[in-house]
Image (cartoon, helix red, strand yellow):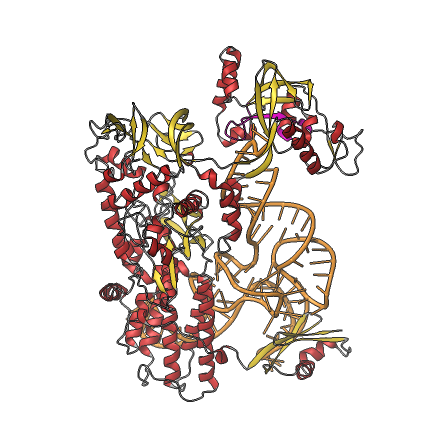
Amino acid sequence: MARYNAKESEQRWQAAWAVRDVFAAGRNPGRPKSYVLEMFPYPSGRIHMGHVRNYTMGDVLARFRHAQGYDVLHPMGWDAFGLPAENAAREKGVNPRDWTYANIEAMRSELQAMGLAIDWSREFATCDPAYYSQQQKLFVDFYKAGLVYRAEADVNWDPVDGTVLANEQVIEGRGWRSGALVERRKLAQWFFRITGYADELLAALDQLERWPEKVRLMQKNWIGRSEGLEFRFDLSNGGSVDVFSTRPDTLFGASFVALSPDHPLTEQLAARDTALTEFVAECGRLGTAEEAIETAEKLGYDTGLTAAHPLDPAWKLPVYVANFVLMAYGTGAIFGCPAHDQRDLEFARKYKLPVLPVVIPEGADPKQFRVGDEAYTGPGKLANSRFLDGLDVAAAKEEVRLRLEAEGRGRAVVQYRLRDWLVSRQRYWGCPIPMIHCAECGIHPVPESELPVLLPDDVRFDLPGNPLDHHPTWKHATCPQCGKPALRDTDTLDTFVDSSWYFVRFCNTAAPQPVDREAARHWLPVDQYIGGIEHAILHLLYARFFTRALKRLGYVDIDEPFAGLFTQGMVCHETYRDRTGQWLLPEEVEKVDGVARLRGTDEPVETGPSEKMSKSKKNVIAPEAIIDVYGADTIRWFMLSDTPPERDIEWTEGGAEGCWRFVQRVYRLVTEMEIAEPAGAEITETVSGPALELRRATHRAISWVTEDLEALRFNRAVARIYELANAVSATPADVPDAVRRESLETLVKLIGPMMPHLAESCWEALGHKSLLVEERWPIADPGLVRADTITIAVQVDGKRRGEIAIARGADDDLVKASALALDGVARALGGKTPRRVIVVPERIVNIVT
RNA sequence: GCGGGCGUGGCGAAAUGGUAGACGCAACGGACUUAAAAUCCGUAGGGGCGAGAGCCCUGUGCCGGUUCAAGUCCGGCCGCCCGCACCA
């Protein structure tokens, strides 16, 4: 029996594709283009199952488009800057660059072993000077266009690692690597002005029709737009404070003003008030951990100041410092209206402040309406509010706005939750920020003629802090303005900057400027982007911002980088523990009659739920090991089968074996069915019976698989292919060879994008000299997709009582008569006369009594 | 708390309002084999009747509704998962 040798075949076909350079992104006049991209990997050292799933899906789409006659751009690169390389340097004494490039080598060969249809000529790593030097040019362009600015900001400072951390690197108030309590520090840092695009980024979400609704919603919430009024309270000390409110209509329900502990006025007051200083420190200690926030009591400190009500200067409100007021949102100060805001209510109850309802729900009596434990936030009519009484909420907001604007005391503003993007990192292994600080004349960009600013190789990692900063010579430069000695910026850019435009660079990786405008115009936007949901906000939002900024600078002419986005699910596996509770690797466990034991022993093993593969729980399977045993096609087929691509998939040994069996089965089908008809023969005769059935199954499969691949429903495409394989297996011997050849060649072509090596071997076994990868996608014959005899169910009162086989397009009366003639129908009717017979053509008959 | 998603056989799952469970995994019965593996054929939601062909009842988290017809639409519960979270 012919056995398919995956290892041999895969190497052979990968070499054949490379020789013909079939995946080079060509540009042929008249052909449509398709840019297929998966999120590029961080070169951690080994590919994992998540990569395999991600790149398999993208590869299927790229190959499918290629077969359909598109010019396909399907590139690969490396998101190669970042902390792990530097940590490896600190821990193992290796150079971050050597470590990174060695990892890239290892991972590239693993990806190549998967047989990906990638244009490797466009490969680059973000740590290549050729890439980051272009990024430095972009940074300078951004700076000149006012898209970059430097400002003092409260940042997360890790005192052990001696660096700023991104918000996502702070876990429960501690640095993710050092475990040290993160401090808040005021530091001068570089920011990208993403908030300038907040409105555009929000509005354009509606146009991203081929994005998951979930991601659009997450971005919408993250941007967090709210409209309101910003206005001034005059204080008893002669000063004033601005507040922001989305509910200015409730102004007559105000009972206090509250400042953030970080508000400048708080600082000013604390300088002369040690009790306040202590209160502020206590607020700081409570931290930002989520549970702390959830359970934290509302705490306030009465400053002793009063604020004059903006609509009645005689009315004085107490001014508190309150722990729940955030400096980072609005103005860092609020007015409290306890009746209509839950937080304000809790605060008012604690400090015995008035709770006056000013919005009365429909039907309630303004004199009777009271607020208990829950603030009323719904609609209603204003009351207890002087000239606002009787207005609805919207009208009252408008009235208050007009009054305060007329007095020059307030203005309508739009607030966003989104903050500007802090891009400075006190780290070595990143793109140096090309700026020079001159003590004499200020901050200047490095002149273009002096770019790139290269990372030095001779750095020490045995000292805490930023290696660039304590390098003996690197930071010393000359001021481009006045020529005096000056200092380089020793910070590097957040690695999310690197990944915000790599997809643009792929259009022409050799361009001497950041973007080859002509190539970018041709290939962009990315038609289908595929990656994990974990990037729903950060990377995808930054890349959207970057694209708009690049457009403003004239580099690209699109607003949105990714026309289609698909977020795939995670790869999971059961977890195992031994008697002492230690995690076990799957290969340390064997199952005998469904009972898990430590391999080669009687030691019982506790099997846990299927969870995302992770090193900490040891429930990982190395793709390399699977490819080694079964080959790349088997692992690819597994990733596409059974589970819808957006859901989490569970890796099982049994499933992998099933896929392997199918690989063998297809090969057997092709090699064992003896076909006299030569390759390329046409079906000339009209066929009937089983031969016609096989032709129908073949063309239905083409139609369905094509639709499913278009919609990225890989699991359904797989099921359709199994159906076709089953139909081919069941073919009687007397079916003409030409028909059998058609079904087998179709099967092979449909499998092509998913299991490309197997498909090439089968194509060859069918007598072809060409490469399957250069063949066109099959086209279904519509006449064969639609059967001319169809089976429809017959119901009596909605219950199925039989079925009839009838010609497509048969007259309703004939359908009705055939249905009524069924034994089962007569039995169910039991002599009753039908009141109605509903015939839905080609669907169903329902007889109603 | 707010927002979103999901509940279908032993498991992963299919199903434009129209025959629920396609397809796969696991399982069971049989064939082939000295034996095993591989392969092939067959069974299979649950319950019942029948020698059998087959027939009947019931079934998509729970309760109700719309409809000739509901896994699918509507209302109300229950459970799980994800995101955000003192955002004024």
In the rendered view, tell whether residue A264 sits above or below residue A173.
above
The part of the chain drawn in magenta is: A323-343
Query: Viewed as shown, does residue A489 lie left or right of A346?
Result: left
Q: Give the farthest residue toward the bottom.
A: A685
Which is more toward the observer, A472 or B12? Answer: A472
Query: Viewed as shown, does residue A786 lie left or right of A511?
Result: right
> Does any portion of residue A384 appear in the rendered image?
no
Does the segment drawn in magenta span residue A329?
A: yes
Q: Quadrant of residue A527?
A: bottom left
Residue A112, horizontal then vertical, whole percent: 27, 57
Which is more toward the observer, A526 or A37? Answer: A526
In the rendered view, tell whether residue A844 sits above or below residue A532.
below
Which is more toward the observer, A829 or A561? Answer: A561
Query: Viewed as shown, does residue A465 lie left or right of A392?
Result: left
Which residue is found at the position 41% from the left and 77% from the top? A728
Does the segment drawn in magenta span residue A5?
A: no
Residue A77, horizontal then vertical, whole percent: 30, 50
Which residue is found at the position 30% from the left and 77% from the top? A766
Residue A651, horizontal then vertical, whole percent: 40, 54
Q: Quadrant of residue A518?
A: bottom left
Count of number-bearing discs: 0
In the rendered view, tell whether residue A263 sits above or below residue A722.
above
Residue A147, horizontal then vertical, whole percent: 40, 38
Which is more toward the observer, A767 or A503? Answer: A503
Quarter of the image where the N terminus of chain A is located? bottom left
Which residue is found at the position 35% from the left and 62% from the top? A72
In the rendered view, tell whether residue A755 sits above or below residue A289.
below
> Does any portion of residue A789 appear in the rendered image?
yes
